[in-house]
């Protein structure tokens, strides 16, 4: 999770009106909030009273798990397999640039909160680690005995999580720079493939290894945001915030997405489908939730020039939220949801059984409108659409939900920053002896907390833990089962042969990693009746470095557009002789209406646009001038596309409203083919005038 740079518009407007009406001295909204902090109710009893006035969705209740003084200013939480809640605190928020300075001279803390008597409230609070070297931590992730901490300029892994006391730490990545730590490193997450996932924001500057060298991703690119600190010659430039995947030691770094602004905790379901949220450019009602299509460009700035959304361009979007994210530009992934004005925070996918009506929903915190939401996604062509349900909210402006996690019993835990302000390096809570901060538990009414006991020493026990709603339980089990390899195969088969698609997807990741078993299980998965398992099979094939062409060949004509979407993405940078042919088959199935599918085709053709487009043109045998064909010409970055674009622009049958679209695509092409096409267009224009 991260807190936000802006002093939130949703808070400022009501406070400003209050100040204008009631404050003749002209105090600022922040001054008023600071005055309120001095008399703000404090402690466990105050928190218990506070939750009584929350608005909670029917059938659920919110209870207090922990409150100040057990913790203060939580930025992020994780819940481990024992039900302990790990908290990254930021008492020293904005201390380097604000007159009140450091609120804790010992530095910020990582706390462990534990309910030892099972009454639903934490009665034990332990400092796992404290120091200025972790000031402003924005994420905690428990993986077995390790704790991964996201913060800038260094991201760390600690040992000692089992005992609850740090036994050592080392940096995984370093020198994540930027003047604003809110827009830098965020949280780590353990993925269904046994890898770490994380985001950095658009002020990060770069990502380096602990030895001071630039991190180099699997595409061979040095990770530098907008190339700010990479010496020439630079082989690539990323824009904005980034999303990554890597091994637990930081190796095999893969850039999954770029051109975000200030992305939060990304999240994923058991099939490996990723989602993320993003904060807009402060006050433009353009905050968003995204399906994080792998290797996608998410449109913060102009891909070619780095220009911001205010700059005029061809085919510019009519409304600010779409314009903000360059949604009309070829190569930009469409947004799943626009969520208006806000400060979107952390998210997770609920896959528990305690609240089956939420199974598969994305859970999300937005600190500005003070909402914990559920997004119910449904397939929409090759992408998704979603409906929103508010689970928890409050009229009290001190409710600032900033993170949400799922416990081992399926209950939902919510971190509350609890302050009259959020972001902009301003807080109204400035008394170091009375800093607020809370964690709540959301569950069905009357539900009592439980902690299932798992035997992580045996394959059978670990397979049982793979059913858990809790990510930390699955992470510990995953690592042990992967270590056991073939010795765990029979136990894993009990889930692979079950009727639960989530369990099956989870263990497919492990079965395919058993030596000499990848082909057997991937062959089964690519022919499975469930499209989500077929999608998972392609992602697993990528992860285990299997023959992608083999599995795309099985699925290239799949009836499900999401499966074909994944086929297109899987072909990215595959240079085999069959890759272009398979891509052309996928392109021939584009319906001319599905932007998700079109962008997946563009990702799949990356760096081989000319080769792939020629294979497609050969397949359609000259019948390219269709709605689907014009889409592909618009999206593909092949030099030869310029001539086709000019034909479309000059064609009197082309609707006037489409021409700006084709002019815009010319901005993304380079080379003599483009120059010749423009000269041809000029010649046609001159002839037309004569």
Image (cartoon, rainbow, N blue to C red):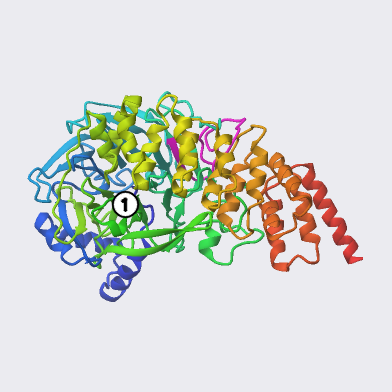
> Where is residue 53 drawn, in percent x and y?
18, 67
- Tell me if residue 187 can be seen: no
The stretch of residues the image draws in magenta is 222-245
Tally of numbered tags = 1
Q: Residue at (42%, 44%) from the top-left corner?
A: 272
The prevailing secondary structure element of the residues shown in magenta is loop
Say if the magenta span includes residue 229. Answer: yes
Up-down: is 642 above or below 153?
below
In-front residue for pair 365/554: 554
In-front residue for pair 102/313: 313
Q: Tell me the SS state at disc 1.
A: loop
> Where is residue 670 drawn, in percent x and y?
72, 44
Extreme bottom residue here? Answer: 21
> Where is residue 465 drawn, in percent x and y?
25, 39
Say if the magenta span includes residue 466. Answer: no
Extreme left residue here? Answer: 117
On screen, residue 377 versus residue 577, left or right, reads left
Tell me if mark 1 has few (under 14), some (14-19) or many (20+) residues whose alpha carbon lies within 10 angstroms of its own.
many
In-front residue for pair 237/15: 237
Tell me the quarter of the picture where residue 614 sits: top right
Read off the residue under disc 1.
350
Quarter of the picture containing the C terminus is: bottom right
On screen, residue 634 versus residue 421, left or right, reads right
> Where is residue 124 drawn, in percent x and y?
10, 42
């Amino acid at each position: 999770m991260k807190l936000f740079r802006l002093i939130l518009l949703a808070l400022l407007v009501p406070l400003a009106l209050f100040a204008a009406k009631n404050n003749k001295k002209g105090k600022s909204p922040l001054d008023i909030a600071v005055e309120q902090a001095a008399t703000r109710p404090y402690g466990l009893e105050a928190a218990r009273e506070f939750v009584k006035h929350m608005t909670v969705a029917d059938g659920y209740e919110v209870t207090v798990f922990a409150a100040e003084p057990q913790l203060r200013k939580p930025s992020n939480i994780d819940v481990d397999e024992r039900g302990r809640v790990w908290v990254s605190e930021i008492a020293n928020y904005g201390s380097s640039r604000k007159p009140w300075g450091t609120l804790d001279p010992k530095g910020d803390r990582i706390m462990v909160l534990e309910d030892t008597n099972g009454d639903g409230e934490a009665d034990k609070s332990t400092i796992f680690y404290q120091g200025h070297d972790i000031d402003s931590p924005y994420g905690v992730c428990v993986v077995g005995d390790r704790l991964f901490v996201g913060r800038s300029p260094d991201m760390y892994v600690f040992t000692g999580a089992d005992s609850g006391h740090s036994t050592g730490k080392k940096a995984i990545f370093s020198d994540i720079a930027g003047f604003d730590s809110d827009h830098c490193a965020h949280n780590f997450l353990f993925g269904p493939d046994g890898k770490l996932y994380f985001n950095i924001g658009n002020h990060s500057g770069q990502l380096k290894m602990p030895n001071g060298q630039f991190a180099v991703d699997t595409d061979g690119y040095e990770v530098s945001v907008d190339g700010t600190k990479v010496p020439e010659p630079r082989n690539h430039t990323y824009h904005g915030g980034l999303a990554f995947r890597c091994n637990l030691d930081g190796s095999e770094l893969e850039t999954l997405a770029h051109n975000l602004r200030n992305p939060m905790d990304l999240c994923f379901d058991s099939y490996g489908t990723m989602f993320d949220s993003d904060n807009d450019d402060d006050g433009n009602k353009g905050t968003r939730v995204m399906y994080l299509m792998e290797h996608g460009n998410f449109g913060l700035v102009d891909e070619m020039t780095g220009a911001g959304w205010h700059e005029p361009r061809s085919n510019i979007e009519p409304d600010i939220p779409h314009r903000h994210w360059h949604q009309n530009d070829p190569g930009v992934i469409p947004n799943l949801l626009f969520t208006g004005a806000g400060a979107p925070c952390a998210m997770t996918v609920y896959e528990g059984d305690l609240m089956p009506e939420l199974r598969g929903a994305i859970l999300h915190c937005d600190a500005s409108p003070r909402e914990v939401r559920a997004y119910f996604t449904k397939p929409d062509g090759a992408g998704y659409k979603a409906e929103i349900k508010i689970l928890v909210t409050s009229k009290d402006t001190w409710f600032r939900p900033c993170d949400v996690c799922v416990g081992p019993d399926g209950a939902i835990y919510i971190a509350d920053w609890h302050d009259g302000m959020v972001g902009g390096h301003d807080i109204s809570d400035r008394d170091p002896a009375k800093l607020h901060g809370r964690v709540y538990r959301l569950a069905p009414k009357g539900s009592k907390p439980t902690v299932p006991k798992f035997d992580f020493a045996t394959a059978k026990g670990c397979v049982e833990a793979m059913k858990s709603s809790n990510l930390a339980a699955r992470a510990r089990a995953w690592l042990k089962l992967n270590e056991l390899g073939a010795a765990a195969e029979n136990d894993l088969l009990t889930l692979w042969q079950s009727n639960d698609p989530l369990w099956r997807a989870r263990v497919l990741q492990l079965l395919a990693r058993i030596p000499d078993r990848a082909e057997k299980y991937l062959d089964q998965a690519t022919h499975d009746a469930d499209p989500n398992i077929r999608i998972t099979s392609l992602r697993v094939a990528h992860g285990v470095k299997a023959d992608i062409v083999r599995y795309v060949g099985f699925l290239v004509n799949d009836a499900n557009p999401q499966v074909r979407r994944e086929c297109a993405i899987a072909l990215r940078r595959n240079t085999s002789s069959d890759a272009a042919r398979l891509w052309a088959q996928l392109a021939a199935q584009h319906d001319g209406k599905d932007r998700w599918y079109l962008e997946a085709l563009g990702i799949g053709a990356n760096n081989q646009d000319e080769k792939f487009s020629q294979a497609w043109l050969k397949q359609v045998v000259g019948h390219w001038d269709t709605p689907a064909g014009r889409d592909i010409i618009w999206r593909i970055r092949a030099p030869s596309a310029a001539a086709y674009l000019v034909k479309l622009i000059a064609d009197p049958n082309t609707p006037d409203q489409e021409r700006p679209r084709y002019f815009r695509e010319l901005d993304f092409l380079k080379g003599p083919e483009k120059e010749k096409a423009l000269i041809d267009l000029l010649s046609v224009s001159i002839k037309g005038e004569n």
